Image (tube, rainbow, N blue to C red):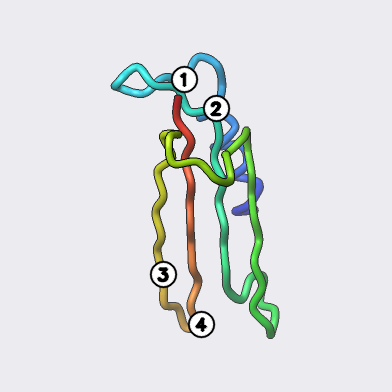
Amino acid sequence: MFLIFSQILFSSFISKTTTLAEGKQILGVKFLINGRLKGKPRSNATTLLVGSVPVQSLEKDIQFSKLHVNTIYGVFGFQIWVYRK
């Protein structure tokens, strides 16, 4: 359910009418979750990509953030890339 909610949320961010305070527009969001998802015994990674995010570019406006969360089931890692124009 969380991944479906995230997909809908990121899709609304990328809609043509959404602009940021600086007048920039979000063109793509990449969201990566690492950890023991859905109670599985082994950790795995799930990637959610909405829009387009360049793989290699120093000239593009891409913001990155990383977060680790400790739970009773283990550690989850969240990474997000936001590509703005």
Which residue type carries mark 1? Answer: Thr
Looking at the picture, tell me which residue is in the foreground, 57 or 15: 57
5 up-or-down from 69: above or below: above
Q: Residue furthest left?
A: 22
Question: Which residue in the structure is indicated by mark 1?
Answer: 18
Q: CA distance from mark 1 to mark 4?
A: 36 Å
Query: For the residue labelled by badge 2, is the local secondary structure a helix, a strand or a loop?
Result: helix
Q: Quadrant of residue 46?
A: bottom right
Q: CA distance from mark 1 to mark 2?
A: 7 Å
For discs 3 and 4, the disc positioned in front in the rendered view: 3
Residue 68's label in the rendered image is 3
- Residue 80 in the figure: left or right of residue 44: left
Q: Residue 42's x, y, as percent? A: 68, 83
Residue name at image x 63 percent, y 38 percent: 50
Query: For the residue labelled by badge 1, is the local secondary structure a helix, a strand or a loop?
Result: loop
Query: For the residue labelled by badge 3, is the local secondary structure a helix, a strand or a loop?
Result: strand
Q: Residue 44's x, y, as percent? A: 66, 73
* Disc 1 crowd, CA 10 A, few/some/many (<14, 14-19, 20+): some
Question: Which residue in the structure is indicated by mark 2?
Answer: 14
Q: CA distance from mark 3 to mark 2?
A: 25 Å
Q: Residue 32's x, y, as percent? A: 57, 57
Query: Counting residues from the N terminus, which is met first, the one under dot 1 or under dot 4?
Result: 1
Q: Quadrant of residue 58?
A: top left
38 up-or-down from 42: above or below: above
Question: Which residue in the structure is indicated by mark 4?
Answer: 74
Query: Counting residues from the N terminus, which is met first, the one under dot 4 or under dot 2?
Result: 2
The reply to whether the C-beta atoms of the residues labelled 4 and 2 are less than 8 Å apart is no
